[in-house]
Structures are given as C-alpha cells and as structure tokens.
C-alpha cells in the first residue's frame, strides 16, 4: 500500500482520493483550532503561498483528540480557518489520528513514517 491508495473525506463530505495529489510534495498535518498552536495556520498559509507553484500541497486534518481543542463541526472549523486565517489549502473532515477510531491514512502514517 502507498499513500495514493487512500481515500479521505473532505470537509464538505466529498470523498477524495489521495491519488489526485500524485506528483506533489505532501505536507499532511493534523490541527486544532483552539490550542496555542492555532496561529500555525498563518505560517502554513505562507508556506503554501510560497511553494504551491513548486508542487507543495498541504493537507489539513482537524483533530479533536488532544484536549478537545478542535470543537465544532467541519463547517464551523472551515469557516473559522478561512475567515480568521484565510487558508486556501485543502482542509478535510475532522478525524481521529490515534486509537481504534483513527482513519486508515493516519494508522498507515503512524506505521510507515
């Protein structure tokens, strides 16, 4: 199995194949909108703006597993991130990254990186 075999859910509920990103450099992040690192969205957007034309894709997966610091549903999280930080990189549905409910992508990443 390779990373391009995974299908993930976009923040709007659509299923997205990671094969859509073949040939790109992927920075896959799990984020929280209510933690001390939330301003990272500014830096991630700056990086995306600077490197998108060179093939960078940032794939943002909000996660509420760590101190419940990503409250709200997918639409609320996306509205917050686009409104406050102006993100334009792909944001996916809120997920679990650890444990039995972790999505297959993150289970694979944990075992293969």
Image (cartoon, helix red, strand yellow):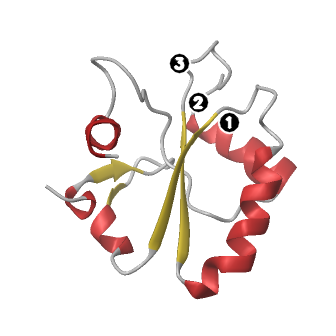
Task: Return the residue nearer the eye: 22 or 74.
Answer: 22
Residue drawn at (38%, 54%) of the image: 14
Q: Which residue reaches farthest left?
A: 1
Residue drawn at (50%, 34%) of the image: 94
Q: Reading the chain from its start, which is encountered first: label 3 or label 1?
A: 3
Front of the two marks 3 and 1: 3
Q: Quadrant of residue 21?
A: bottom left
Residue 70 in the image: state x and y as whole percent.
65, 26
Q: Which residue reaches farthest top?
A: 67
Q: Is 52 positioned to the left or the right of 5 in the image?
A: right
Contact between marks 3 and 2 (CB within 8 A): the answer is no
Contact between marks 2 and 1 (CB within 8 A): the answer is yes
How far apart marks 3 and 1 lie (CA) works out to 17 Å
Q: Residues within 10 Å of mark 1 (few under 14, many from 20)?
A: few
Residue 68 in the image: state x and y as whole percent.
63, 15
Q: Secondary structure at mark 3?
A: loop
Determine which of the numbered discs, if any, sits on residue 73 in the image.
2
What quarter of the picture does the N terminus occupy?
bottom left
Task: Return the residue nearer the eye: 10 or 58.
Answer: 58
Contact between marks 3 and 1 (CB within 8 A): the answer is no
How far apart marks 3 and 2 lie (CA) works out to 14 Å
Residue that label 3 marks: 65
Q: Secondary structure at mark 2?
A: loop
Residue that label 1 marks: 76
Residue 66 in the image: state x and y as whole percent.
59, 17
Q: Is 41 positioned to the left or the right of 75 in the image?
A: right
Residue drawn at (62%, 40%) of the image: 75
């Amino acid at each position: 199995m390779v990373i391009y075999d995974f299908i993930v859910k976009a923040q709007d509920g659509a299923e997205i194949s990671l094969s859509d990103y073949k040939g790109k450099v992927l920075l896959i992040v799990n984020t929280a909108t209510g933690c001390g690192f939330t301003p990272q969205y500014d830096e991630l957007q700056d990086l995306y703006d600077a490197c998108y034309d060179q093939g960078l894709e940032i794939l943002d997966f909000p996660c509420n597993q760590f101190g419940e610091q990503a409250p709200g549903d997918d639409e609320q999280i996306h509205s917050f991130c686009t409104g406050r930080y102006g993100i334009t990189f792909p944001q996916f549905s809120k997920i679990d990254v650890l444990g039995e409910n972790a999505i297959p992508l993150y289970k694979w990443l944990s075992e293969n990186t």
